[in-house]
Amino acid sequence: MTLALKPLHPLFVAEASGVDVSQPLNDEDRKAINAAMNEYAVLVWRGLNLSGEQQIAFSESFGPLDIGLKRVFKRQERLSDERLIDISNVDLHGEVNQRDSPKNLSSFANQLWHSDSSFMSPKAAYSMLHALIIPAEGGNTEFTDLRAAYDALSPELQREVEGLSAEHFALHTRQLLGDDAYTDEQKKAIAPAIWPLVQTHPGSGRKLLFVGVHAHRIIDWPVAEARIFLLDLLEHATQAPFVYAHQWQVGDLLMWDNRSTLHRGRRYNLSERRELRRTTLNDTPKANLAAF
């Protein structure tokens, strides 16, 4: 079978089928998926029963995986393979965390608009998130299209942001939410990354507005002015016409391009069990295979 795509939003996002992602991909499948990602930026796969190993194998078809903030936290993890990132409210013993647990506190930052690992160099290309257990209500994941956000800027703003660069810091969002109990060693574990506010996607060739809450200052600007401007740009980029809200079903696998989109998780009842597994890969040429 060949890859089939069903658009789910006027601007981006498509439901994907026709390729068995639980099995090794051939070059044709990889190119087709990359081409779909270049166009839609978010793909939704339904009804998958993937093991952690199968998710890792699918993800590594597009490049090397990254462990992100595990470099900072270096704590015991529930999942045995460090390439699997545990997006859950479950502790090491398999029990639902207490509401005020450190893990929940850290996870609240996922409810802010962000791009995975924008605080690193290389930054993230694709992320894949697989749903195992979901709560009865809430917990949606929302995405916004940074390409459409750039296109909708006024010509004056496009000229103003061209040439500006922002610094992205790993712990900025955690500290913003009051989680500031980090050692100097942890603060230095991931050096800030600097990225242009206007970028051209290497696969699609489209310009995009690379903002998000990890961006905490603009190079050579006063901090206060920069943060207000970054908030204005983020508000612009997350307007309703640019946003898709995904209501999870068990077995969903979402694959998104962190270079073209921002995302955020939505609130849910923390006393209900929620388990998802994420893999994230670095921005390397292999993630743009369809462009060559």
Image (cartoon, rainbow, N blue to C red):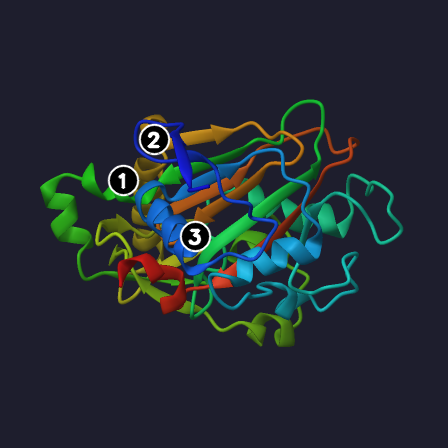
Q: Position of residue 29 (x, y in %)?
A: 43, 52
> Which numbered mark, 3 or 2, is in the foreground of this view?
3
Q: What crowding class fits label 3: few (fewer than 14 Cα within 10 Å), some (14-19), or many (20 or more)?
A: some
- Disc nearer the start of the sequence (1/2): 1
Pointer 1 with pointer 2, Cβ within 8 A: yes
Q: Position of residue 248 (x, y in %)?
A: 60, 30
Nearest the eye: 279 or 14 = 14
Identify the residue under disc 1. Answer: 149
Residue 239, which numbered label? 2
Check the image and report above or below for 178 versus 152: below
Residue 165, which numbered label? none
Q: Secondary structure at mark 1?
A: helix
Identify the residue under disc 3. Answer: 29
Q: Is residue 147 visible?
A: yes
Nearest the eye: 219 or 16 = 16
- Disc nearer the start of the sequence (3/2): 3
